[in-house]
Amino acid sequence: MSVDLSQFIPSFLEESFEGLELMESGLLNLKPGDNETIHSIFRAAHSIKGGAGTFGFDSVTEFTHLVETLLDEMRDGRREVSSADTEILLESVDCMRLLIEAARDEQDYDHDKVSTTSARLSETLGGQQSTDSDSENESNVNKNDGCGYNIKFIPEHSLAKTGNDPIFLFSALAELGELTISANTEELPALMDIDAQELYFSWELTLITTAEEAEVIEIFEWVEDECLLELEPIVNKANEEPTNNISDVADGVINELSVESSLGEIENQEVLASTKVDNEPETATGEKSKTSKTKAKADLGSIRVGVDKVDSLINLMGELVITQSMLSELGNDFDMSKVERLTSGLEQLLQNTKEMQESVMRIRMLPISFAFNRFPRLVHDLAIKTGKTMELVISGEQTELDKTVMEQIGDPLVHLVRNAADHGIESKDVRLANGKPEKGTISLDAYHQGGNIVIEIKDDGAGINRQTVLDKAIDKGLIDANAILTDSQVYDLLFEPGFSTAAEVTDISGRGVGMDVVKRNIQALGGRIQVESVLGKGSTFKVNLPLTLAILDGQLVKVGTETYIIPLISIVESLQIDNQLINRVSGDMVLYRLRDDNVPVLPIYQMFNLETECTEIDKALLVVVEGDGQKVGLMVDDLLAQQQVVIKSLNDNYQQVSGISGATILGDGSVAMILDIPGIINMALEQAQKIQRVRTDGNSNVAAEVCL
């Protein structure tokens, strides 16, 4: 009998990474005397070590054993919880993650980092470990002065239902020494009465080992509430009869044992033999065969889906089947008397399809806590590195976001949080001098707003000095010295490539690299970022994102014979043009006076070389949109419906087109292009600059051919 353990590796990896997150979160919040948290951290480490041993990830097992030993001393009260121990454990979690990722990808890891951390752990364990003079004596109680143990293991019948398999327990015991197994089948019912999910066996085991009793009991820790466990040390007779050595005693004990062999026991032993991943057949050259070993790569494309979401899909599928059956029946001998029923059936089909679409989209939605979980550790490390006192407050972590969006927003959020810690939060002395609390606060919040999600990164630090930003921008030639900018436009300068107001460069930030990438990555997701700040009070960065990249809420507009889609997230307002508010400036640029703003008007028909009868601005409609912190008015012929559209990539089906972010198929089968608002603004800017250059060169003939 052989068990292919490789099929369980993806589950082990997924659970291990979750366990590492639990350990990290627990360590960050660990306080002296918090035994419950210490126990949960220990259990996570113990589970990872056990699983790694089962699958042959020896490097993970060996390293985690040191971590587990340190945690065990804290758990038993032999060591007080100290900040130094917490830091080394946090560093150890990083190494465990490194080792597990290397095992997953079958790649090498940073041996120096792991060795250094292992040495620190060993040094920590070799130091003062006891909290009282009696603890050393207590720890020696479990010393094995004999040569092994007789173990009686009687599990509850329901043990297997909780996912615990005695095979794995026996495999772990076998690693401690020589194991002999005897199965008791007295409670095994008749074949017709056997429940496949029940466990009817009990076992008597003999373990010849020099391991301590605590090590043996530890193996049964996960099932201690679901079994009867008895350990009886096998006394080392060498203490009584000096002429006999341990091996003689062991042989004598084994010879005296009454071992009952049965078919079930033989099968169990075969299973145990197959659980050692390293025990693979060798080739003629002595090398292990690689054919039976599959790569231990995690299934990165998997999503954990709640049962309620699956149930909803199953129910909707049933409704669709009923509706389809009804419509099929109507199709037989159809006449006009059935039109009303047909219309009703189509409406029901439409409703079911819409609900199905929403349910399918919900499957991809995950709590944003998956993205937020990394930040408590990040802020903790930054506080130590900067010497500042700060805390992270997280709210809205159950707000759901599409998995694809969440994976791509992680790095921009990391950069914004690092900036808040380095630039935003002041030093302890400065905060106290300004009448602020010693501890600075960085807040992460997520909430839904309309059909989008808003992520706020807020700090109560020094805020952004508007004049400093302006001076730096003028010095770098980004703006004219006489330029009049709103606060929003000034703060947008922070996202210019290479822009930085930091007085000195640190290993955290200050090189002017990153904020432009942050903005570009957010825009690539169809989102936008806004900055609000009050000098001396703090700053807020608001990231507005679509809930999903697969479906877009859009406004359909007509330009000539073409239909375009403008993302609703980019639209400020739509309006009928008033001739009295139109201004023409040099370069044939048309500005529309919208309250306190002068909004450039961009004729879509000219930008995409379309023919239309609506070429006069006073006969068109204006859709005011915002992108890259700038408002423009798109001149269109007509406004059509608002609807959700499925986004199709142009890169996959054709090629990238300036001003177009994708395409979709409308209900009538026609293809409509989705406008890329930042791209269109850049196109208009480039054309305006080209006109300016041509006019400067005095070539008016060429300038006349360039239109905006």
Image: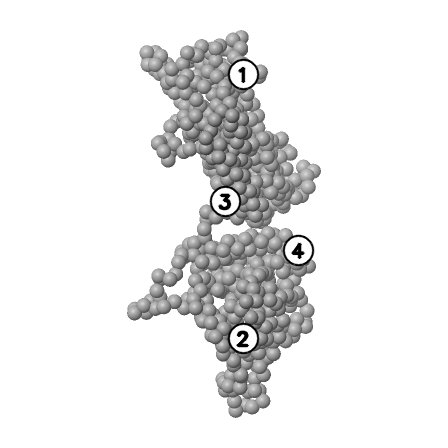
Q: Nearer the viewer, residue 607 or 699?
A: 607
**Counting residues from the N terminus, which is met first, the one under dot 1 or under dot 3?**
3
Residue 183 bears which disc, if any?
2
Label 2, secondary structure: give it: strand
Label disc, if present, on residue 507 of the rendered structure: 3
> Measuring 44% from the left and 60% from the top, which residue is drawn there?
6
Q: Amino acid at mark 3?
A: Asp
Tags 1 and 3 touching, CB below 8 Å:
no
* Picture coordinates of residue 359, whole percent (x, y): 54, 39
Image quadrant assignment for residue 699: top left
Q: Residue at x 46, y 25 (%)?
A: 565
Disc nearer the start of the sequence (3/4): 4
The reply to whether the C-beta atoms of the residues labelled 1 and 2 are less than 8 Å apart is no
Estimate the x, y position of residue 316 in percent, counting from the top left. Answer: 54, 40
Distance between the alpha carbons at the discs numbered 1 and 4: 60 Å
| Precedes in sequence: disc 1 or disc 2 | 2
Residue 27 vertical position relative to residue 512 in the rendered view, above or below: below
Observer able to see residue 562:
yes
Q: How far from the left and from the top, in percent, is residue 428?
A: 64, 43
Observer-side mark, 4 or 2, equals 2
Measure the C-alpha gap from mark 1 to mark 2.
83 Å
Kindly identify which residue carries mark 4: 31
Disc 2 marks a residue whose amino acid type is Ala
- The one of 684 and 511 positioned closer to us in this rendering: 684
Q: Residue 575 shows which numbered tag?
A: 1
Q: How many numbered callouts?
A: 4
